[in-house]
Amino acid sequence: MNIREQAEEREFQYLSRYASHSRESKGRERVEEECDIRTVYQRDRDRIIHSKAFRRLKDKTQVFLAAQGDHYRTRLTHTLEVSQTARTIAKALELNEDLVEAIALGHDLGHTPFGHAGEAALNEICPEGFAHFKQSVRVVERLEKNGEGLNLTWEVRDGMLNHRTSGTPHTLEGQVVRLCDKISYIHHDMDDAQRAGIITEDDIPVTLRMLLGYTTRERLNTFVHDIIESSMEKNHIEMSSEIYEAMMDLRKIMFQNVYDHPEAKKEEKKAIKMLKKLYTYYIENPDEMSAEYRQLMKKGESKTQVVCDYLAGMTDQYSMAKFRKIYIPKAWEVY
């Protein structure tokens, strides 16, 4: 029995009867030889971490566009916080921590530059439409490794696809990530908004603070404990109705005071116009895209879809640099 097989055996011994066991995965689209050390979900986690799309998350907007402050979250730090919170809950519930980690690390791989503003721009202009959760799966199935994809397991891809609010993950591990995505962004986006002076604790009704906590740290602790206590020995993941309703009330406050706040969003219209201009430019000049994207068109992918893929993969800074290069004249520097 090799190291992987020993790890699979331990899963059957120690994980909950509701957990997803590596040995019972529905598998990959392309059959591969098993690793002698790592389980299938450990391999998926490693493939995501080593992907180009994962590295690009460090320069993609979470809330504040291309934020220059040292301490504002990016899409990468959001991803890491979701992973940490989800792993804490998975361990407490004796679920498969490796599967949870893989789903969490991959759930936002398809996000655009400039956060949901970029997503809205591409959804409006691309004939195929655009949704970041679908793009995350497309990244790992089609775009990474020069069109080969990462060949992840069905369970990881299902969790990535269904992490949105209306999603229905088929595994408990996916359900954990779905809730942790929500509580994480509410937690850290409020922390960033307080740092930016857009919201204060006094903007939160005292009834919510009495129930959930008086600081972002206390509220996160309340959410985590509630999920664990409400889901223990159950075949699904849930929050108590009282805490869930309070969380959604807090989410509404975030939309009213932060996500739709004119100060936080004053640059979004510019970002949307910029991405639309870049889309039109690359539709007219597809040969100026990177070689890996041009190759996708040669394999039969539509030009509109590939241009959308190219723009979605850009970081905030790279998209602005491309815009400047294409549309902003350079000063003559010979003296």
Image: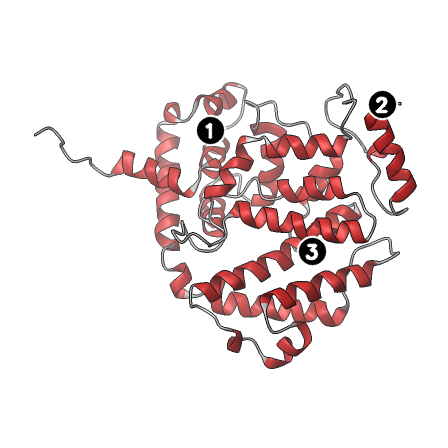
Q: Quadrant of the C terminus?
A: top left
Please identify, in this view, whether the residue under mark 1 or under mark 3 is nearer the observer.
3
Residue beneath disc 2: 2
User: Relative to residue 19, is residue 263 depicted above or below?
Assistant: below
Examine the image and state in which quarter residue 35 appears: top right
Count numbered badges in the picture.
Answer: 3
In the rendered view, would you say 294 is above or below 249? above
Question: Could you tell me which residue is drawn at 60 percent across and 69 percent down?
Answer: 250
First of labels 2, 1 by sequence position: 2
Judging depth in this view, the residue of 248 and 52 nearest the camera is: 52
Is any atom of residue 167 visible in this view? no
**What residue is disc 1 on?**
303
Badge 2 local density, few (<14 within 10 Å), some, or many (20+)?
few
Q: Earlier in the sequence, mark 1 or mark 3?
A: 3
> Where is residue 22 drawn, in percent x and y?
82, 34
Instruction: Specify the farthest residue to the bottom.
Output: 206
Front residue of 199/237: it is: 199
User: How far is disc 3 from disc 2 in space, using C-alphas?
Assistant: 35 Å
In front: 233, or 279? 233
Are discs 1 and 3 less than 8 Å apart at CB? no
Q: Is residue 249 above or below residue 27?
A: below
- Pinpoint residue 73: horizontal percent, then vertical percent: 50, 52
Residue lying at 82% horizontally and 26% vertically, measured from the top left: 3
Separation of disc 2 and disc 1 at Cα? Answer: 47 Å
Residue 92 x %, y %: 80, 53
Please state which amino acid type lies under the numbered disc 2. Asn
In the rendered image, the quadrant that contains the N terminus is top right
* Residue under numbered circle 3: 179
- The tag earlier along the polypeptide, 3 or 2, is 2
- Residue at x-position 53% and y-position 66%: 254
Pointer 1: residues within 10 angstroms few (<14), some, or many (20+)?
Answer: some
Image position, residue 124 (x, y; %): 46, 47
